[in-house]
């Protein structure tokens, strides 16, 4: 199926920009993708990947592009007001995230989910909200944004894990472009089973739902790393760390 038939109402600028940018990203990352067939061929979805390098959004975007869907991310609302960058974010269909208040965030979540369902688009949401604080780069405790967005309109959550981007840019480290074409393995999983929290549509347990998503992401990463994931996910609060912003040594 051609890409043109997979995305409804896509921005006309998106695909030409992606056609230029994707080969450049491919010079940096040599992706090995498994499970791409689990990404819906059409309709709305939320992709939930792990996050351990400032460079991994490039690998995630390229993997989703190679799977035939538009890699649209949730981005901070303030970025949309930056000259040029804001224009690029808007014309490529990126989704602004409101952080002004919980009421504003909840309202925007509902509006965004309705837009995704209406237009048959997908969005990439990092459930950790920032780079993992786990010293071994395993997924840490997640935030509820991804499941909140998905549960609002019954959108599937597709877990995704990747490993290898730290060779190009270690967490809070320096960019290492040479040698080119560093190996990055990507694994898409089956949609997360959220039926246990969807039974009560009025008050779904977002924390439980988020834990289910994070467990699936960790299991996928465990396959890629060929080692067991920690039994308990890292909680920044237990280690005196802030949950957002740059991790201080």
Image: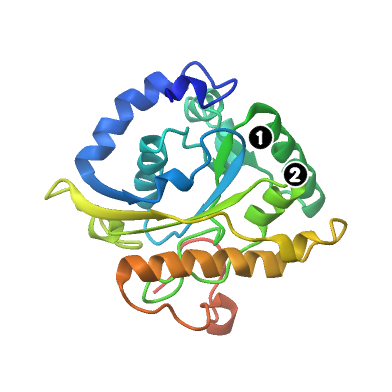
Between residues 104 and 185, which one lies in front from this camera angle? 185
User: Is residue 87 positioned above or below 129 on the image?
Assistant: above
Residue 141: quadrant of the picture: bottom right
Q: Is residue 211 left or right of residue 160?
A: right
Of 215 and 175, nearer the camera is 215
For image coordinates 33% across by 24% down, the residue present is: 19
* Count of marks overlaid on the render: 2
In the displayed structure, 155 sits above or below 210; it is above
Q: Residue at x 43, y 44 (%)?
A: 37
Residue 13: x, y in percent?
46, 18
Please give the residue where the numbered disc 2 appears in the rendered image: 153
Q: Residue at x 67, y 56 (%)?
A: 147
- In the displayed structure, 236 sits above or below 246; it is below
Of callouts 1 and 2, which one flags the residue occurring earlier in the amino acid sequence? 1
Query: Which residue matches tag 1?
Result: 116
Residue drawn at x 63%, y 61% is 193
- Corner quadrant of residue 205: bottom right
Which residue is nearer to you in this view: 113 or 159?
159
Relative to residue 41, is residue 195 drawn left or right? right
Q: SS at mark 2?
A: helix
């Amino acid at each position: 199926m051609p890409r043109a038939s997979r995305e409804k109402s896509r921005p006309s600028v998106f695909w030409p920009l992606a056609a230029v940018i994707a080969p450049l990203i491919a010079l940096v990352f040599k992706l090995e993708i498994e499970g791409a067939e689990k990404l819906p061929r059409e309709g709305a979805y939320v992709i939930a990947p792990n996050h351990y390098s400032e460079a991994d959004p490039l690998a995630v975007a390229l993997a989703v592009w190679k799977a035939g869907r538009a890699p649209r991310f949730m981005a901070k609302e303030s970025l949309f007001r930056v000259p040029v960058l804001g224009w690029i974010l808007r014309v490529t269909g990126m989704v602004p995230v409101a952080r002004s208040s919980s009421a504003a965030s909840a309202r925007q979540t509902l509006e965004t989910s309705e837009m995704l369902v209406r237009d048959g688009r997908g969005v990439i949401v990092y459930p950790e909200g920032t780079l993992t604080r786990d010293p071994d780069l395993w997924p840490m405790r997640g935030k509820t944004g991804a499941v909140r967005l998905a549960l609002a309109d019954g959108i599937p959550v597709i877990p995704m894990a990747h490993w290898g981007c730290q060779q190009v840019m270690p967490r809070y480290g320096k960019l290492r472009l040479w040698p080119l074409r560093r190996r990055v393995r990507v694994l898409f999983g089956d949609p997360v089973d959220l039926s246990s929290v969807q039974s009560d549509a009025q008050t779904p347990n977002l924390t439980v739902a988020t834990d289910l998503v994070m467990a699936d992401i960790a299991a996928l990463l465990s396959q890629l790393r060929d080692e067991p994931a920690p039994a308990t996910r890292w909680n920044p609060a237990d280690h005196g760390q802030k949950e957002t912003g740059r991790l201080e040594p």
